[in-house]
Image (cartoon, rainbow, N blue to C red):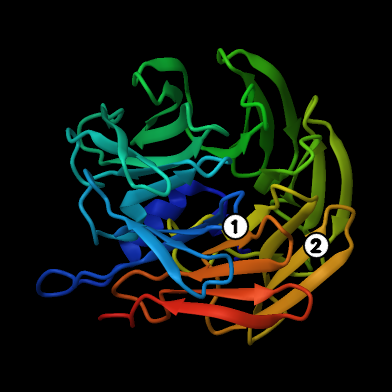
Amino acid sequence: MKAYSKAYSTTAALLGLAAAAPACAGPQPSQLTVDSVRYTPDGTLVVATNDGFFLFDEQLVSQQGHIALGGPPAFKEPNLYTYSLSADGTVAAASYSSGTSTTAPILLDLYRVPSGEVLNRFQIAPPGPAGFGNRMLGMALSPHGDRVATMPWGGSNGRLTVMDTVTGAVVWTIPSMDRSLAGWSADGATLYAAAQTSTSSILEAYDAGGALKWSQPFPYIVWPVSVIADGTMLAGVASEVPCASPCVEQYSLWSAADGSQVAQLALPPDVAPYSGPYGGVGNGAFTCSATDNVCAIQLEDRNGPPYPQSLRVYRTDGADVLTLPLGSSPASSVALSPDGQFVAVGTGVPAWAPGRNAVDVYRISDAMLVGSHDFGPPMH
């Protein structure tokens, strides 16, 4: 099975994680799980976990703060949470879904960074019909944190909804079954998304009022996808389903102005994006820099066994910047520092799974490990 087949569908990933948890006689132990890493413009490294947000310096030498979860409970299964950080680094969001209740609302808290002040607290009505648990499939704060795009889902019902973070008012909403949020334009005027089926995708752009600016269909899966630094294009990977053998994925660029395909560059045969073995944890280990047209992606070589993972940092013109072997600890998330010197790699696993809950920072120029923080051993 190709990596994207378990990664691009957020719905399938969340359900897969729940099904993968082993049965046990008694409650699972509490454990902090690293979900995602992001840098703020001033170089603060923000680590999102099911115990809140941990703040570190750029090289992970010292911890600078901890924003505890105020409303959502801590230490629950990691796929019950979603997180977001505004591009200006001033607002963080955390949501929590029960995952089993058909009536409990989805909790959404907004925090000031770095102080931890609770800016607002919302309860989002569950969208699902009776008999279905409700989840938040995705969430993206606008550049200054004044709006938040959310993807609540329940059974056959789902919605893409943009809310005002000050008042809680719904700005606009549309039905949505399975979309990936690609992010906002730098001015907050456009929200980009990718709607997927099992074999195709539609890239979309919505204006501030929810009107569709453009829509481009493609006969391949677009996953992952992100806005690049200069705002002119979206970057990601295109995957044909089904594909010839060997499968060849394509690094791709699409115009932010109209969604048209701008360029493609083939990956090596049977090498594909990899989101780690546990769906619902992290951001799929793909990101693009906010300050330079550079992206970072986790890849898996399917020509094994073994099936090694690596992290590739590359310029959007296709030029290699760094290839970093990841060994036995695949990434759940990755972030590029604003000065372009460092890449942070988060490895997060559920309490019942083997592996590390840690963050490592590498210097891009020579792949040297400059900082590491372990949040504790796995507990089974």
Query: Residue flagged by tag 2: what amino acid is it?
Result: Tyr
- What residue do we see at 80% from left, 50% from top? 293
Image location (x, y in percent) of residue 366: 77, 81
Residue 210 locus on image (x, y percent)? 56, 15
Label 1 crowd bin: few (<14), some (14–19), many (20+), radius 10 Å = some
Tell me, for residue 43, which label it has, or none: 1
User: Left or right of 362: which side holds 132?
Assistant: left
Along the line of sight, the residue nearer the viewer: 276 or 248: 276
Residue 287 is left or right of residue 29, and the answer is right
- CA distance for labels 2 and 1: 20 Å
Left or right, 274 with respect to 317, comes to left
Q: Secondary structure at mark 1?
A: loop
SS under mark 2 = strand
On the image, numbered disc 2 is attached to which residue? 314
Quarter of the image that includes the N terminus:
bottom right
- Res. 196 visible in picture: no
Rendered-image quadrant of the C terminus: bottom left
Residue type at mark 1: give it: Gly
